[in-house]
Each structure stands twice: as structure tokens, then as C-alpha cells.
Amino acid sequence: MRRLVETTDADGLEKFLGEHIQLWCINYIYAGLLVGVNENDCVLSHPYVVYETGKLTEEKFKFAESFGVQELFVRISSIEAYALAPQLKG
């Protein structure tokens, strides 16, 4: 697994290492600081689950709740789309 301490000329998810991102997955939307990526999983630090986005052009989610854990591992095969995230607290 690659971690934030490495510097690469990366593309895809690796491009967002060290950034707050949102992962649009099969069932849920997750958000957090991307701190790790490998072939199977990505790791979000201080993760949130987004229950209601509100307007997608807004600067924060309408309703997002912390998982209350330091890291959340998300299976890459469940990710449908990803991008930089707005402010996490909604």
C-alpha cells in the first residue's frame, strides 16, 4: 500500500493522496482525507458517510456523519466516481 509520505507522478486515485475527497460508491458516499491507495483498497482518514449532499454546487454537505474511527478502508471495486470533497461537516 502506498502512503501519503511517498511522492509519485500519479494518476487516478493516487493523484488525490493528501486531499479531502468524496467517493461515490455503490451504496453510499464516503468522504475523508485520502491517505493510502493500493490495487484493492483506498484509506480515508477521519472518514464521513454522506447521507444527504444537498446542492452539489454548495461548499459543504447537507448531512454527513463521522464514522468515529481514525481510518476507513474502502474497496476500490465499489467506487463508481470520485472527486475533491467540499467541507466535510454538514
Image (tube, helix red, strand yellow):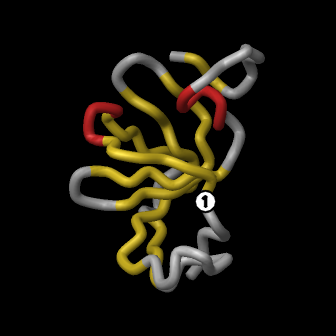
Say how many tags the image has. 1
- In the rendered view, does 6 fall on the left or right side of 31? right
Q: Which residue corresponds to the image point at 67% horizontal and 77% vertical from the top-left?
A: 59
Where is 27 relative to 88, above or below? above
> What is the residue that sits farthest to the left in this orientation?
27
Where is 60 relative to 48, above or below? below
Q: Position of residue 28 (x, y in %)?
A: 30, 60
Q: Position of residue 13 (x, y in %)?
A: 54, 32
Label 1 neighbour load within 10 Å: few <14, some 14-19, many 20+: some
Where is 33 relative to 8, above or below? below
- In the rendered view, does 14 fall on the left or right side of 81? right
Please name the residue that numbered disc 1 is placed on: 85
Amino acid type at image mark 1: Ala
Query: Residue 8: which quarter of the image?
Result: top right
> What is the residue that sits farthest to the front in this orientation?
57
Q: Position of residue 33 (x, y in %)?
A: 62, 48
Query: Residue 36: which quarter of the image?
Result: top right
The image quadrant where one finds the C terminus is bottom right
Where is 81 relative to 43, above or below? below
Q: Which residue corresponds to the image point at 60% horizontal and 76% vertical from the top-left?
A: 57
SS for callout 1: loop
Q: Which residue corresponds to the image point at 31% horizontal and 51% vertical from the top-left?
A: 25
Q: Which residue corresponds to the image point at 47% horizontal and 75% vertical from the top-left?
A: 64
Q: Position of residue 52 (x, y in %)?
A: 39, 80
